[in-house]
Image (cartoon, rainbow, N blue to C red):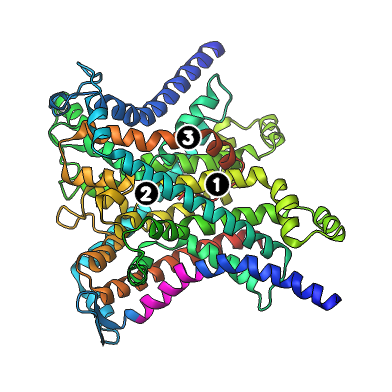
Amino acid sequence: MYRFKKILYNTIFILMVTLVLAVIIVPIYWMVNTSLKNPREVIDPIPSFFPRTPTLANYRSVLGSGLWKNFSNSVIVAVSATLTSIVLAFLASYALARYRFPLHINRLFLIWVLVVRILPPIVLAVPLFTLFNGIGLINTLAGLIISFQIYTLPYSIWIIYGFLKTLPKEYEEAARIDGASPMRVLVSIVAPLVRSGIIATSIFALILAWNEFLFALLFVRSPRLLTLPVVISRYIGEYTTQWGELMAIGLFASLPILIFSNVVYKKQTEGFSMSLK
Amino acid sequence: MRNRERAVYSSFFYIVFAPALLIILLLTTYPMVTILYDSFFRYSFVVNTRTFVGLGNYIHIVGEELFQRSLINTLVFTLVASFSEVVLGVALAFLLKRQFLGKRVASLIVIFPMIISTMVICAVWQIFYHYEIGLFNHVLTTLGMQRVGWLTDQRVALASIILVDLWQWTPFAFLIIQAGMGSIPSEIFEAAQIDGARSGQIAVKVTLPILRNQILLVLMLRTLDTFRLFDKVYALTGGGPANATQTLSFFIYREGFKFFNFGRASAASVITLVGVAFLALFYVRRLLGEEE
């Protein structure tokens, strides 16, 4: 009787896990599946689970249509936004962790950084658009790199500050007594000690910037400057029948970040970050 | 000499702190002050003149049916999506609690949805939801049921968007709650088992109360994130059908970037910010209240 119950439980368990995994995998599989179908099969009212005549035509036409340009825009913007955030956040967090500014600036700034995290970004968009328009940053990649700081900078400051706060001061003090300048201490002593934390923070910031949609949509108009998420949204809106091509672009936009899933899993279960978004 | 050295030391910290401070002030504080100011003016980007109207923008917006619909839709989406994600996340954490072969791989797959771009996700779900060629309607017709206008029927459209959000963000709730479970010492479970508690009782009376703060944290983060719903509406429905999926963020977007009524967009932004502040205060109180 006991054994029967155990087998029953195990069967239910396996069924449930399989169901959960299926729910997650089917949409991702459907991208691959659709991207390999020819245009006629895609609009067949009876959707097929395997492409009947697999073709790479969608990939060829997408790559031939200048998608590389958009792909490289995404890379440039995401990498630059991340580097900017990490450098600025590292410097600022160090100052916040090691120096007491007057007027409670330390605490006020850290609270403000958390407040920014909960703002709906659209409320900032109108004034920023006017501001950026006035200084020639609309319709440039630089404008995107700066506006993405709204997401990546507060996030990086909060995490890197957490790391620096727990770091013992002894090494830094020893180096200072030996006559090293503050900048020297920062670069040669502190930076190596928090390296792994900084790498993990960079990966999270990179994913945020890679997927950003709102400012990428509002601040850039020329097709050759668009990032991948906006290209995808245009496909959804305008070329509604090009499902195969759309899915091919979707895969191009997803693969570079899926390789980080291992890091995301490990760090997030450590309670490392509050949220990706 | 000593004083000079200290001055150099202090100025170093001011110099390294300044860039981040300036960027944050420029990108967040300046716009927030600006929307508060602009919200009292009739101000269109096209003609670029400001006319003071006092609370006029606020009074007009609040009286409009479209704005009321946006507010209600946002609240419905926020409540339903964030609560469901927490419930599903807890369920998933309980399901994947025990050790089994392939647990690591399963956990990795589970977090895929939260790292993929929202636009990519919308693209796939757009195909699923398609009236003629979509997978969902194919399953329904195979089962002998009527097709559903997932994104075109005004009774269903908002629920369809909620479903996409559940798919994308339940993994996030799962991760945080799983982390909380991992930090519970196993002695607690053993003690409960020795006392003769059944596993269902342990879950409800032991595990869930310990996870209270994790659950509240996830609920807070998801509430604040769902409250800003924009991307999915933009990609899947454009606010339709018949405004059934209009949200506050989408309302601001249309006022600001379609009609260039910056004054009205600013007023709607201020109202949205007040809503966010209420949500945040509510949760912060609950989270801090526990510690006292």
Q: Position of residue A260 (x, y in %)?
A: 50, 36
- Location of residue A257 by image quarter: top left
Residue at 28% from the left image edge and 71% from the top image edge? B265
Residue B207 at least partly seen: no
Q: CB atoms at circles 2 and 1 under 8 Å apart?
A: no
The boundaries of the magenta stretch are: B25-37
Of the residues under marks 3 and 2, which one precedes in the sequence?
2
- In the rendering, at what x and y percent does residue A215 appear? 35, 58
* Chain of the residue under label 3: B
Question: Do the residues at pointers 2 and 1 share their chain?
Answer: no
What secondary structure is the magenta-colored segment mainly?
Answer: helix
Q: Indicate whether residue A199 is drawn in magenta.
A: no
Q: Please name which of the two marks, 2 or 1, marks the residue nearer to the observer.
A: 1
Q: Respond whether the residues carrying marks 3 and 1 are from the same subunit.
A: no
Labels 3 and 2 in the same subunit: yes
Q: Residues within 10 Å of mark 2 (few under 14, many from 20)?
A: many
Compared with A237, A94 (above or below) is: below
Rate crowding at label 1 as few (under 14), some (14 to 19) or many (20 or more) other CA atoms within 10 Å: many
What whole-number distance in Å separates the C-alpha atoms at marks 2 and 1?
29 Å
Picture quadrant of residue A19: top left
Which image quarter is the C terminus of chain B in?
bottom right
Identify which residue is drawn at 29% across, 64% down.
B71
Q: Amino acid at mark 2?
A: Ala
> Residue B33 in magenta?
yes
Judging by the rendered image, the residue that carries numbered circle 2 is B81
Pinpoint the chain carrying mark 2. Answer: B
Q: Nearer the viewer, mark 3 or mark 1?
A: 1
Q: Which of the numbered marks, if any, corresponds to residue B92? A: 3
- Seen at 45% across and 34% down, the residue is A258
Q: Secondary structure at mark 1?
A: helix
> Which residue is disc 1 drawn over?
A202
When the figure is inspected, residue B228 is found, relative to residue B14, above or below; the finding is: above
